[in-house]
Amino acid sequence: MTKKEIAQNFLKLAASGHPHEAFRLYVGENFKHHNVHFKGDADTLMLAMEESARKNPNKIFEIHHTIADHDFVAVHSHLKQNADDSGFVVVHIFKFESDKIIELWDMGQPIPTEMINENGMF
C-alpha cells in the first residue's frame, strides 16, 4: 500500500466513525498532530474524531486531490457534517516514517454560500 493510499484510508476510516481502527492500522509510535483545538497526542485526537462521528453520523467525506512527496502526503478534501451542510474544504498533511503516520497537520475553510471566484474551491 502506498503512502497516498494509507493517508486516504486513514481519513476515510476516521470520517466514517472508525478512528480507533484508523489509528491502530496507520499511526506510528510518538505520533503528534498540530490541530490547535486539542492536545497534541494520538489518543486525544482519536477521541475527538470519535466524538465528531457520534455527533455527526451522516458525515460526508470526499477526497478531491492527493499529493505525495517522499515522506509527506497532502490530501485536499470536502467534509460535510450532513447532506444539507455546504461543508468545509480541508487539507491534511501527513508525515510518514516507514509506512506509519507520525505527524499530522490539518487546515479547514468553510465553503461560503456565495463565491466571487468562479472556479470554486475544488
Image (tube, helix red, strand yellow):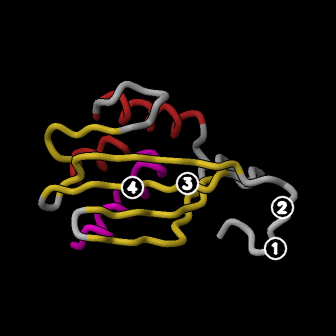
| Callout 4 amino acid | Ile
Residue at numbered disc 1: 118
The residue at 28%/46% (across/down) is 103
Q: Position of residue 114 (x, y in %)?
A: 87, 58
- The quarter of the picture where residue 121 lies is bottom right
Q: Which x, y percent locates residue 116? A: 85, 64
Neighbours of disc 3 within 10 Å: few (<14), some (14-19), many (20+): some
**What type is the residue that disc 2 sits on?**
Met
Report which residue position mark 4 lands on: 93
Q: Nearer the viewer, mark 2 or mark 3?
A: 2
User: How far apart, in angstroms, are the residues tagged by discs 3 and 1?
Assistant: 19 Å
Residue 115, label in figure: 2
Element under disc 3: strand
Q: Residue at x 74, y 69 (%)?
A: 120
In this view of the protein, which residue sits in the foreground, 9 or 78? 78
Q: Nearer the viewer, residue 85 or 75?
A: 75
Neighbours of disc 2 within 10 Å: few (<14), some (14-19), many (20+): few
Q: Tell me, yes or no, whether the two marked residues, 1 and 2, touch with CB atoms within 8 Å.
A: yes
- Please give the name of the residue rendered at 75% of the width and 74% of the height, measured from the top-left corner: 119
Q: Is residue 13 magenta?
A: yes
Q: Is residue 59 above or below residue 53?
A: below
Sequence-first tag of 4 and 1? 4
The residue range painted magenta reads 1-18
Q: Quadrant of the C terminus?
A: bottom right
Q: Which residue is mark 3?
A: 90
* Circle 4 residues within 10 Å: few <14, some 14–19, many ≥20: many
* Figure quadrant of residue 43: top left
Instruction: Mark 2 or mark 4: name the one nearer the start of the chain.
Output: 4
Q: Spatial distance from mark 2 to mark 4, Cα to Cα?
A: 26 Å
Q: Helix, strand, or loop for circle 2? A: loop
Q: What amino acid does circle 1 point to? A: Glu
Check residue 81 for magenta coloring. Answer: no
